Amino acid sequence: MELSKAYMQGLSLNKISFLKYYSLLFITAITMNCCENATNRKPTISNKTSQKTIKKTAKKETLTKVKKQILVQDVISDKNVRSFFIDYGKKNPETKLILKTRLGNISIQLFKETPLHRASFIYLIKNGYYNKTCFHRIVKDFIIQGGWSDQNIVQEYRSQLNNYRIPPEFKKGLIHKKGALSATRRWVENPGKLSNPFEFFIMQTSLDCSHLNFEHTVFGQVTNGLEVVDKISKVTLDEDSEWPEVDINIEFEILP
């Protein structure tokens, strides 16, 4: 937590030394905690900017700016998200996908038991969002996370869709086991545990991750290609980040 300048000026030198000492202990404790096994980990919340994003955006900013264009025709917000996707889901009932990457393909089955998340995922695929993204966060022996990139068009999609969120659809039998497809969400200022539909993660670990159940909505399962998930989890990462050194772009195909 960052202290205000006025507050800092009001502290005595002894108090500052005391604060620094315990701040160091706090940072050390956090670092040690990050090294614990997957049973204590939580997926990073959406929109976390990696060092690679900062570097690449600075380098390409003048080259990749998107001309203002209408990317989606629909108006979706937190107010109408439920009714919109209930209706959209009836007209778009697909549940089978192939996720194509440079390391191989992953077959995915979406769950009918989570109709809002399923319909939203299909909607974003059909409207071209995910095919502009990549796997941007890899946590070895835990998860692979996708749905973001350093292209400005990705942020433009989110903006035009009002950064809508989805109510949770927790189901007792849908758990965070290896190959589970789950939605990211904010862990702060989000008492309703609303999902961020623009990013997703796939469980790579076989360890017990029951601490994620009823915290993130599981809305699909890998049915083939777990070896590809393992390959992605082992790629070399960009320095000081969880972003792959070489981008792993995403391409979805919806099966009939």
Image: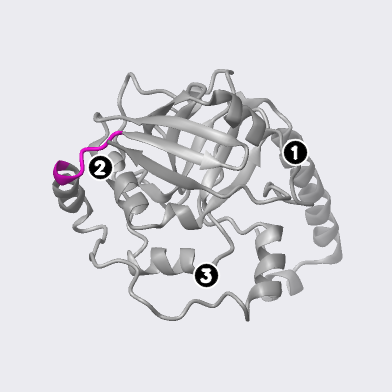
Q: Earlier in the sequence, mark 1 or mark 2?
A: 1
Mark 2 neighbour density, 10 Å: few (under 14) some (14–19) many (20 or more): many
**Neighbourhood count class around disc 3 (C-alpha, 10 Å): few under 14, some 14–19, many 20 upward:** some
Q: Nearer the viewer, mark 1 or mark 3?
A: 3
Residue found at x 69% / y 66%: 56
Among all residues in the image, which is located at the extreme front?
256
Q: Residue at x 63, y 81 (%)?
A: 62
Q: Measuring 52% from the left and 46% from the top, which residue is drawn there?
A: 146
N-term mark: 2 or 3: 2
Q: Nearer the viewer, mark 2 or mark 3?
A: 3
Q: Residues within 10 Å of mark 1 (few under 14, many from 20)?
A: few
In the image, taking residue 135 as reference, residue 147 lies left or right, namely left
Q: Which residue is mark 3?
A: 152
First along the sequence among labels 1 and 3: 1
Nearest to the observer: residue 254 or residue 66: 254
The region drawn magenta spans 90-95
Instruction: Indicate which disc residue 114 carries.
Output: none
